[in-house]
Amino acid sequence: MTVENDILRYRYQGFLEHAKGNSTKTIDSHLRAIVGFNQFQRGRLFGTITIEHIMAFRKHILEKVSQTTGEELSASTIVHTLGALQDFFHWLVDSEFPKFDRAAIEYFTPPKRTELNARTRPRRQVPTPEDIARMVAAIDIDTFIGLRDAAVISIIFLTAIRDGALVSLRIKHVRADQRQINQDTNEVDTKLGQNQVTTWFPVGEQYEAILLKWLHARKAAGATDEDPLFPKTPSMIAPKASQADCNLPWASATPVRAIFKDACATAGLPYFNPHSVRNTLAHMKGRVCRTDEEKKAWSQNLGHKHMRTTDDDYAHVASERQHELLAGMTTRGEEGLDAAEIFDLLRAATPEKRAAVRVLLSG
């Protein structure tokens, strides 16, 4: 970058961090887009960019081939890159170049087809509760490594904790007596620095038992409340390791993803990443929760302020299941109600009608 452009990029980085409160990951993705644009323009000063320059870059990124896959960039990558540049130039106009042609910024808009493709891209496969049970059952928990791996999967299923937060958990953050974990943003790497106390979801006592067994094993090995729940080198796994090494946390979430990958392979399942378990729990909401209040509590326990976030972003119905449901509706016709429909009718009924149904069924 030229010195002038580099100074502007640095100022924008501060704006994203301090004014917008974006995470490091989000800031990095925006800066990558700016650097890529600057390289394409060969260091041309941002204040001198014209519509023609923007259109040339737009054409370039639509035709660009990924160095990793050898294929054209995905629709989501294109939409994100152009959107990040649009935001950047709006900031430039507001703070640095008030005379810049605002109309030119609109030329960063991606084609409608690309936007639609990005919104409707195939969703990742979501594990069922039965898949997760198979993953855990395939692990030998009589070994320390196996117990650790099963505990990692179990706590994610119990709490929907993100893998980035998981690796920063300390033993003290597990409130076993209250069936909770305390995601204290001062000590746990939570998303957007959000404090959250998560109660264990009702997914099965076997997962609670595995987590408690791991917690007991850590404490039996001499770990204190301040030590990592999942250390880089647990003392019971490597007895000859120094005490300092035994109290180091994982540096990243890569080992967590490796645990899921190995467990899926052993169980004969396709790879499910740790985050996909949050989708599993979002799908379970509709089957487990009986009242609107319970559904709201379930969503909040996932860390969502609004139930719409849970339903729209995590509880998507897979296309195969969509077809099954529609086919079932066709064969069912207008006669007969399934259990869910009966429950909905009962919930909406008056107390008198519920009492009448109770008499009818008991008689």
Image: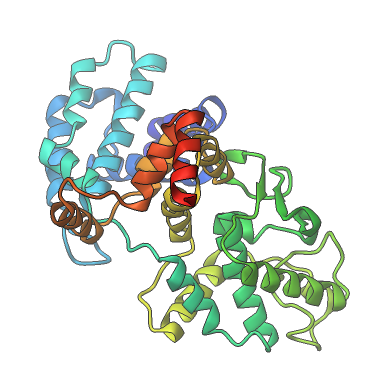
Q: Confirm whether residue 9 shows in the render.
A: no
For the point 12% across and 37% down, which residue is it? Answer: 111
Establish if 331 lies above or below 102: below
Residue 161 drawn at (x, y percent): 58, 55
Q: Is residue 315 left or right of residue 275?
A: left
Q: How is the image coloured?
A: rainbow
The front one of 49 and 351 is 351
Instruction: Locate the N terminus by quadrant.
Output: top left
For the point 87% across and 65% down, which residue is it? Answer: 224
Q: Confirm whether residue 160 shows in the render.
A: yes
The front one of 114 and 352 is 352
Quarter assignment of residue 95: top left
Establish if 16 lies above or below 317: above
For the point 18% across and 17% down, which residue is it? Answer: 103
Residue 68 drawn at (x, y percent): 27, 66
Q: Is residue 167 left or right of residue 344?
A: right
The number of discs equals 0
Quarter assignment of residue 72: bottom left
The front one of 165 and 265 is 265
Residue 252 drawn at (x, y percent): 58, 63
User: Can you name the residue that lies furthest to the front here?
Assistant: 363
Residue 31 drawn at (x, y percent): 40, 41
Q: Is residue 107 left or right of residue 207?
A: left
